[in-house]
Image (cartoon, rainbow, N blue to C red):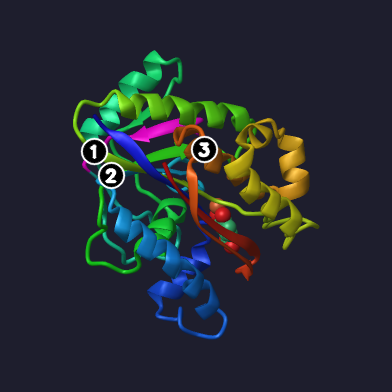
Amino acid sequence: MARIVAGVGTSHIPAVGAALDRGEHGNAYWAPIFAGFEGARDWLAGIAPDVAIVVYNDHASAFSLELTPTFTLGLAEVFRPADQGYGRRKVPDVAGHPDLAVHLLERLVADEFDMAQALEMDVDHGLTVPLSVLCGTPPAWPFPVIPLAVNVIKYPQPTARRCFRLGEAIGRAVASYPEDLRVAVIGTGGMSHQLQGERAGLWNPEFDRAFLDDLTADPERLAALDHVTLVRDAGSEGMELIMWLVMRGALGTAPRESYRFYHYPASNTALGLIAFET
Ligand code: DHB
Ligand code: FE
């Protein structure tokens, strides 16, 4: 039987990927940030999951603004890094896990979560930067990945509670997969940030720290946050944090917090990382 052994919430800031790709991660600006990733890398290498479900959002890379599914599961054998205007990141292609992905699709739809299906999907910084954060620069990613894309960029986004409940359904679906697999769930995006408008550059450490605390202690409080509160307190793009609730829902009650890192600024956002074991 498959089981979820670990969960991670992490920002997916494109400049973090660019710093690594250009070899600038050791400079004065980035070194403290990459030092903060090291504990999570060592921890995840120790966990060595067989497969990871990465909950991320597409930033109008694979989907156009004319077609915006709310929840999409990637069923392919392989996913290529998307060209976001500067060419594809020179990171490994992302191997999928079609068997488990199809099982998740069947179970989630039976559980009344109507997932869209992607047989081909390029993956943008929302997915590849977290892999870089957690795995560094290996010649191949150390585990296959099932991408789960959530619409957070275009109104109306799913509620925080819907994301949390989707995570709980993922937990049930994984538990009904017959093969022995150790599964990690990675939620990406956040933390507080706003990239445009008068409040561009916003950060809210009080909100972020309370969010990190309650991911462990009181995720139902976070699941009750409405969109207006999220946008007001975390910024328009801080809404991405609802994807961390998919991860947290999948972990069940009382996972153990293994690692935490919080830093500001990275690019123009607050950067957070939290790791759990079940
Ligand atoms: C930026 C983009 C993102 O998608 C994000 O989540 C954080 C920061 C950026 O362009 O700086
Ligand atoms: Fe983003």
Mark 2, secondary structure of its residue: strand
* Marks 1 and 2 close (CB-CB < 8 Å): yes
Image quarter of the N terminus = top left
Q: In this view, does 244 lie above or below 22?
A: above
Q: Quadrant of residue 4?
A: top left
Q: Cβ(mark 2) to ligand 2 < 8 Å?
A: no
Residue 88: in sight, yes or no?
no
Amino acid residing under circle 1:
Leu
Q: Nearer the viewer, residue 107 or 88?
A: 107
Q: Nearer the viewer, residue 260 or 256?
A: 256
Residue on which the image places disc 2: 51
Mark 3, secondary structure of its residue: loop
Residue 69 circle label: none
Residue on which the image places disc 1: 181
Instruction: Please give the range of residues in magenta.
Output: 66-77
Q: Position of residue 53 (x, y in %)?
A: 36, 41
Residue on which the image places disc 3: 254
Asked if residue 130 lies left or right of residue 262, the reply is left
Instruction: Report the Cα–Cα distance between label 1 and label 3.
Output: 21 Å
Magenta stretch: includes residue 194: no
Mark 1, secondary structure of its residue: loop
Amino acid residing under circle 2:
Val
Mark 2 nearby-residue class (10 Å; few <14, some 14–19, many ≥20): many
The quadrant where ligand 1 appears is: bottom right
Q: Residue at x 39, y 18 (%)?
A: 109
Amino acid residing under circle 3:
Ala
Q: In this view, does 27 lie above or below 99?
A: below
